[in-house]
Image (spheres, rainbow, N blue to C red):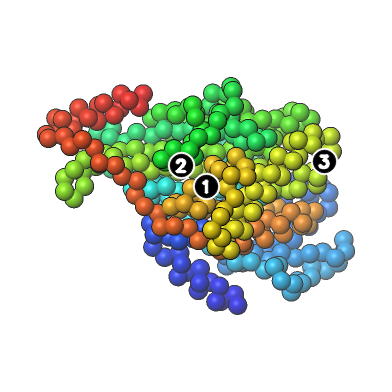
């Protein structure tokens, strides 16, 4: 069964970066934390062949490791990262291809899914010493743009937003909640800051500041909330000449999403949590799981409207977009239930079929000469400031 599954994965994931028709799913195991070691926990996850994940359950504290051959305890993904995988390794395997696609005017999105403490924010944002996917993607993007053109033709804009308690907020300029609107490009948050980025250096600081703006749990003052979803959008816009020498505007959008903790609200230590908040976190993640179910089952109606999160993810999940899911897990047997739950959803996400990813291209007023074209580019740059 396993061999068949690998073959199936191989055939559908060919033609990378363009006509892919399903979500790529990766798993990342984090190292055992000091706290977990001190609590006497043991490792219940093994990763083999860079692909297979074995989850084992200890029936008793001192039991020998028992490989139970129950259904759903052995999983295969597009790649699985052991606890010593580097940030660069994770970036190159999961996201580098999408950056290339975005530079061709396509859309892509990467989302991290998993329980609180499983390593989502580490994977997405990382630290100053070990920057994560968000920073590495932008760095790579700037390098590739520099290799391609020196004329300043490419404009890069960033926006960073949060969904918390069914409210959408701008993390780059915190203030009043944003309203979601549907326009021809899909669902957009009206009034969201579009920050024009010129270099990587400023981006890490910007994102860290943005992360500090994420909603904090009242009782855990130093921690960003496990109930907030953070979405970074990177939009690359440039002009090219097509085969018939018309100038066309191309726009590629990369969305990088750090989802809220997938654990059930009741399973946390926040018994005092306001019920509204608990209900809403369930609402967003429940909506996400019902959308995944509906997409897998090939249903006509996908219930995106059920939550803000699923509205924002609409074009990533079912639309014309290259989508990557990274499922983050802890190795500790104390997190067995959460890990099993995460792997279950990751396994299911492999079945989602997406539409072919097209180039977003719009014809421009045709400039007659090179000077006209240069003027046009200057205008574009001005507009973007
Ligand atoms: P989440 O965002 O899923 O709640 P975090 O990313 O905050 O979890 O990770 C929890 C802790 O584990 C953090 O202290 C983080 O630095 C650490 N951590 C997570 N993944 C790794 C990893 N791959 N290598 C080293 N430390 C990690
Ligand atoms: Mg986090």
Image coordinates of residue 171 in percent, x first then y, are: 56, 29
Distance from disc 2 to disc 3, alpha carbons, whole Å, reads 37 Å
Left/right of residue 119 with respect to residue 105 in the rendered view: right
Image coordinates of residue 249 in percent, x first then y, are: 28, 39
N-term mark: 2 or 3: 2
What number is the disc on residue 314? 1
**For the view shown, which residue lies furthest in the top direction?**
175
| Mark 3 nearby-residue class (10 Å; few <14, some 14–19, many ≥20) | few
Would you place residue 196 above or below residue 135 in this image? above
Residue at 64% across / 53% down in the picture? 289
Which residue lies under the disc numbered 3?
Answer: 269
Q: Secondary structure at mark 2?
A: strand
N-term mark: 1 or 3: 3
Distance from disc 1 to disc 2, alpha carbons, whole Å, reads 8 Å
In the rendered structure, are the residues bearing label 1 and label 2 in contact, judged by CB atoms less than 8 Å apart?
A: yes
Left/right of residue 220 with respect to residue 23 in the rendered view: right
Residue at 38% across / 34% down in the picture? 156
| Mark 2 nearby-residue class (10 Å; few <14, some 14–19, many ≥20) | few
Residue 12 at least partly seen: yes
What number is the disc on residue 280? none
Residue at 45% across / 33% down in the picture? 158
In the rendered view of the protein, which quadrant contains the C terminus? top left
User: Which residue is more in the foreground, 222 or 302?
Assistant: 302
N-term mark: 1 or 2: 2
Would you place residue 146 above or below residue 382 in this image? below
Q: Secondary structure at mark 3?
A: loop
Would you place residue 157 above or below residue 119 in this image? above
Which residue lies under the disc numbered 2?
Answer: 186
């Amino acid at each position: 069964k396993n061999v068949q599954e690998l073959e199936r994965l191989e055939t559908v994931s060919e033609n990378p970066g363009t006509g892919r028709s399903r979500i790529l799913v990766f798993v990342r195991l984090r190292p055992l934390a000091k706290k977990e070691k001190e609590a006497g926990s043991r490792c219940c996850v093994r990763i083999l062949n860079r692909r297979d994940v074995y989850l084992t359950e200890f029936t008793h504290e001192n039991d020998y490791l028992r490989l139970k051959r129950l259904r759903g305890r052995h999983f295969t993904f597009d790649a699985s990262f052991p606890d010593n995988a580097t940030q660069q390794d994770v970036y190159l395997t999961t996201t580098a291809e999408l950056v290339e696609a975005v530079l061709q005017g396509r859309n892509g999105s990467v989302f991290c899914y998993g329980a609180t403490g499983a390593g989502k924010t580490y994977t997405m944002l990382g630290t100053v010493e070990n920057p994560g996917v968000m920073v590495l993607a932008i760095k790579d993007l700037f390098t590739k743009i520099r290799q391609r053109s020196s004329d300043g033709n490419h404009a890069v804009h960033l926006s960073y937003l949060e969904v918390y308690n069914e409210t959408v907020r701008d993390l780059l300029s915190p203030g009043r909640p944003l309203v979601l609107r549907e326009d021809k490009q899909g669902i957009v948050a009206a009034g969201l800051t579009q920050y024009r980025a010129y270099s990587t250096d400023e981006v890490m600081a910007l994102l860290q500041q943005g992360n500090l703006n994420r909603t904090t749990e009242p009782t855990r003052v130093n921690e960003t909330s496990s109930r907030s979803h953070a979405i970074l959008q990177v939009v690359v816009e440039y002009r090219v000449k097509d085969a018939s020498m018309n100038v066309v505007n191309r726009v590629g959008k990369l969305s990088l999403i750090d989802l809220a903790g997938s654990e059930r609200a009741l399973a946390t230590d926040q018994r005092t949590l306001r019920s509204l908040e608990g209900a809403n976190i369930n609402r967003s993640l429940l909506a996400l799981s019902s959308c995944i179910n509906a997409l897998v089952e090939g249903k006509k109606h996908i219930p995106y409207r059920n939550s803000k999160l699923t509205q924002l993810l609409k074009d990533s999940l079912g639309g014309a977009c290259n989508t990557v899911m990274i499922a983050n897990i802890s190795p500790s047997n104390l997190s067995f239930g959460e890990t099993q739950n995460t792997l279950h959803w990751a396994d299911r996400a492999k079945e989602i079929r997406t539409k072919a990813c097209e180039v977003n291209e719009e014809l421009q007023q045709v400039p007659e000469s090179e000077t006209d074209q240069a003027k046009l580019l200057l205008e574009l740059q001005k507009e973007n400031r």
